[in-house]
Image: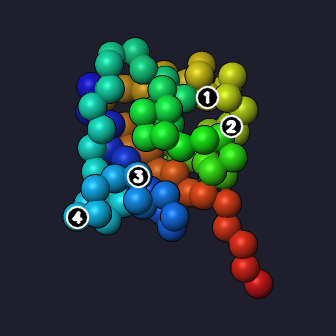
Amino acid sequence: MKIHVRLFASLRDRLPRADRGRGDVELRDGASLQDLLDHLGIPVEQSQMVLIDGQQSPRQVAQRAAIPLSGGHTVSIFPPLAGG
């Protein structure tokens, strides 16, 4: 199944440079949110906020493993941000 991925800030490098942090990822049917993060090589501490079709997901690995993805979902992933 194809998942649309949007990566922000320092995570943009997880996709080819030409994609500028946006692209599609092919996963097996029944894959979870955690499977996507593992596929992209994004550790839990680097995925501060994750949205699935605009809805925020939990940060705990066990809870993310229980969230199934479906073809066509858009997953947006933000790293920890700092600033003032």
Q: Are marks 1 and 2 in contact (CB under 8 Å)?
A: yes
Residue at 76% from the left image edge and 84% from the top image edge: 84
Residue at 32% from the left image edge and 44% from the top image edge: 4
- What crowding class fits label 4: few (fewer than 14 Cα within 10 Å), some (14-19), or many (20 or more)? few
Q: Which residue matches tag 2?
A: 58
- What crowding class fits label 2: few (fewer than 14 Cα within 10 Å), some (14-19), or many (20 or more)? few
Mark in the foreground, 4 or 2: 4
Secondary structure beneath label 2:
loop
Residue 72 relative to residue 31: left or right: left
Q: Is residue 59 visible?
A: yes
Mark in the foreground, 2 or 3: 3
- Name the spot of residue 44 as percent of width and height, x first: 65, 40
Mark in the foreground, 1 or 3: 3
Q: Nearer the viewer, residue 67 or 83?
A: 83
Q: Nearer the viewer, residue 48 or 18?
A: 18
- Name the spot of residue 27 as percent of width and height, x first: 32, 26
Residues at marks 4 and 1, CA–CA distance in whole angstroms = 29 Å
Residues at marks 1 and 3, CA–CA distance in whole angstroms = 19 Å
Q: Earlier in the sequence, mark 1 or mark 2?
A: 2
Residues at marks 1 and 2, CA–CA distance in whole angstroms = 6 Å
Q: Which residue matches tag 4?
A: 18
Q: Earlier in the sequence, mark 1 or mark 3?
A: 3
Instruction: Name the amino acid, label 3.
Output: Arg
Q: Which residue matches tag 1?
A: 64
Q: Which residue matches tag 3?
A: 14
Secondary structure beneath label 1:
helix
Quadrant housing the N terminus: top left
- Name the spot of residue 78 as percent of width and height, x first: 56, 57
Secondary structure beneath label 3:
helix
Q: Is residue 72 visible?
A: no
Q: Quadrant of residue 53?
A: top left
Q: Nearer the viewer, residue 25 or 14?
A: 14
